[in-house]
Amino acid sequence: MKCRPQWIPFLVLLLVPILAACGMDRFDANGWSGLTIEADTLYVASGEGHLVALDISGDADNDRNYPAVIWGPFPPNEGKEVFGYEEDRFGAIYAAPSLGTFDADGVTGSPTLFLATYEDSESDDDVKANFFAVDATTGFKNWSTSIPGRMVSSPTLVGNTLMLGTSDGFLYSLALEAAERSVPRAAWRSFESDGKIWSAATASNGILYFGTLGHTVHAVNVEDGTPVWDEEIKVGGAVVGSPLVIGETVYVGALDRKIYALDAATGKQKWEFQGDNWFWASLASDGTNIYAATLGGTVYAIDLGGREIWVTPQKVSGPILATPVILSNTLIVATNEKQIHQLNLSDGREEWYWAVGERVRADMVSQGERVYVMDIEGVVHALNTERRIKVWTYDSQK
């Protein structure tokens, strides 16, 4: 395996507190925006502020088939008004769009993509996140609205309610209307946390769980936004990834090198696990074990009681910011060193790795034996993990 300069993980660690202090908007959106997949359609949101839908149905039959464009890139360069757009571009996109079908007033809506963007501003007081609903079948814009602050995480759709976290520390709720082109109304007054929210909230049994850069984890009722836990739950470091909820336990990784297991009903800590470096990426799970990756390039497998499964944690080529993906009996891990690693799920052995053109920060998506990765230059890579080949690449910036 190719060696990496030893200073790279330390450089990433140095940049993280700067990102937190200055706000993500001071940095290029490329590489943070991501992918959404549904059936045979891959939706690609680029840091340049465009959205495209790709037909990936041919990947399974012909492993060298280039993806066909279903629609986009939107907003289009010409004739944008026909598709409902007034904008020439969406603005900086820092997270993957969320895809969902909602029910409102007894009416079932069509599949819709929800994405948040914002433009940089010289004054923090003037920053607003622009929020869009796009018809997933046609690419037409259904509606757009704005909320105060910056939004760098994916929205969470629960029933007909959208939950939006901002880097100003607020959680907003929007109730979707039966008329798909109607701008949503506020479902309840915003919930104010004590730190920036950089990841999507996780919904489970009518409760939203989310972490903040203020070293806290919160649980609020979806219906009215009231806190579920009696007291504020503090952990030892900033929480960048989305919480993982399994049964009656909430699991979060933090930037103090620890994973915390919290009681879902009370927030009380059940156990903690010590890693070798910061846990930036969200945790992955097959329902039996948890797979966690650090900025030090280490991958851990632990059971739901916090005990290690692999005899030795696996070291890969560099810092890991993207959430690992579980495919059958393998674990796919992307690094900031331009490599994708395929690990054996049972013991962590490296089975294969691919080189991609640039570093990877955004979360991957998968379907069947295939995994889709977008690097920081906006190039999408389709990889077949069974045949261990790269199927195609698509440049979303062109």
Image (tube, helix red, strand yellow):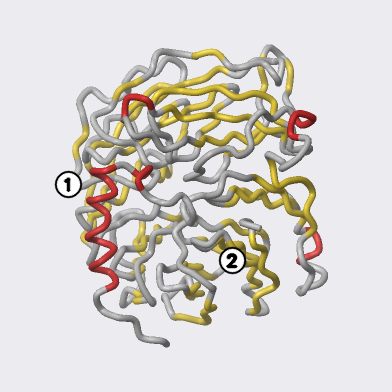
Residue located 20% across and 47% down the image = 237
Q: Amino acid at mark 1?
A: Gly
Badge 2 density bin: few <14, some 14–19, many ≥20, Cα 10 Å: few
Q: Secondary structure at mark 1?
A: loop
Judging by the rendered image, the residue that carries numbered circle 1 is 236
Count of numbered badges drawn on the protein: 2
Q: Quadrant of the C terminus?
A: bottom right
Residue 307 point in image, percent of width and height: 29, 62
Q: Amino acid at mark 2?
A: Ser
> Residue 199 sits in which quadrant?
top left
Residue 82 point in image, percent of width and height: 79, 30
> Residue 68 sits in which quadrant?
bottom right
Judging by the rendered image, the residue that carries numbered circle 2 is 328
Q: Secondary structure at mark 2?
A: loop
For residue 367, side relative to residue 374 (left or right)? right
Residue located 47% across and 64% down the image = 360
Residue located 20% across and 43% down the image = 235
Q: Earlier in the sequence, mark 1 or mark 2?
A: 1
